[in-house]
Amino acid sequence: MLLARLNFHEELFYIFSVIKIIVLLISKPIFVDPINAWEIASPTVVSVLPTWPGYDKPGFGAPPGTAPEGTGIIVSSDGLILTASHVISKATDVKVRDIKGELFSAKIIKNSISTDLALLKTELELRPITIETKKPKIGSSACLISNSFGLNIGITCGVISATGLSNIGFNDIEDFLQTDAAANPGSSGGALVNLNGELLGMMSGIFTKNTDTNAGVNFAISSGLISKFLAN
């Protein structure tokens, strides 16, 4: 009789333990880390390599006319790549380099200086990024995937510091997200994504004083303005 009672109590303890675990699993938010954002979005981001005639600061080992590298975002499966207008606006030739290091020729098919948005076209079939058109919440996590300093595609992470910013002075038409995810020369055209790897914005400018390096106040063109640009 005592043995049966102990077994009964053990069964109750086991049942309640299982229920407690289930409740904890249901109530606890699922944590998604930047690794997820990187694995999903990085294959959709490329380095952009423009050639500008007469550019006299090509960098160590680069031939004259080779302008600073930028970044691009694959936005369609038939080879359309979004980038920043200021990266390619003076270019006579543009190449893109995928995350594996392969080089491909690209043509400029659309260039909007007023929004700092441009479209390149390659003859490749590529996997496009998913665009999140819903405005992110201030304080939510965000990661920038870009070709910082021309060192190939990498990731930095931070938060959304502000949304809906205009009159910053970079472009004639502005709708910016502000982030403290680190951005540097070469990050222009980079993909600002959420932790699900969905596009929130495209990096356009960094706030600096006497330096071009990251100061933690960086501006990405919102996915809403990007969607309007692509639709037109």
Image: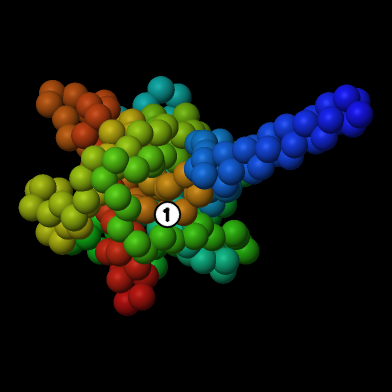
Residue with the mark numbered 1:
199
- In the rendered image, residue 197, in percent from the top left (x then y), is placed at 50, 49
Q: Residue at x 59, y 43 (%)?
A: 23
Q: Is residue 92 above or below residue 98?
A: below
Q: Nearer the viewer, residue 38 or 187?
A: 38
Q: Secondary structure at mark 1?
A: strand
Task: Give the side of residue 38 with respect to residue 210, left or right.
Answer: right
Which of 90/97 is in front? 97
Residue 56 left/right relative to 208: right
Residue drawn at (32%, 77%), measured in percent from left and top? 232
Question: What residue do we see at 8% from left, 52% from top?
Answer: 167
At x 78%, y 31%, the residue is 9
Compared with residue 74, is residue 147 higher up or lower down, i.e. above or below? above
Residue 8 lies, in percent from the top left, at 82, 34
Residue 32 in view: no
Q: Amino acid at mark 1?
A: Leu
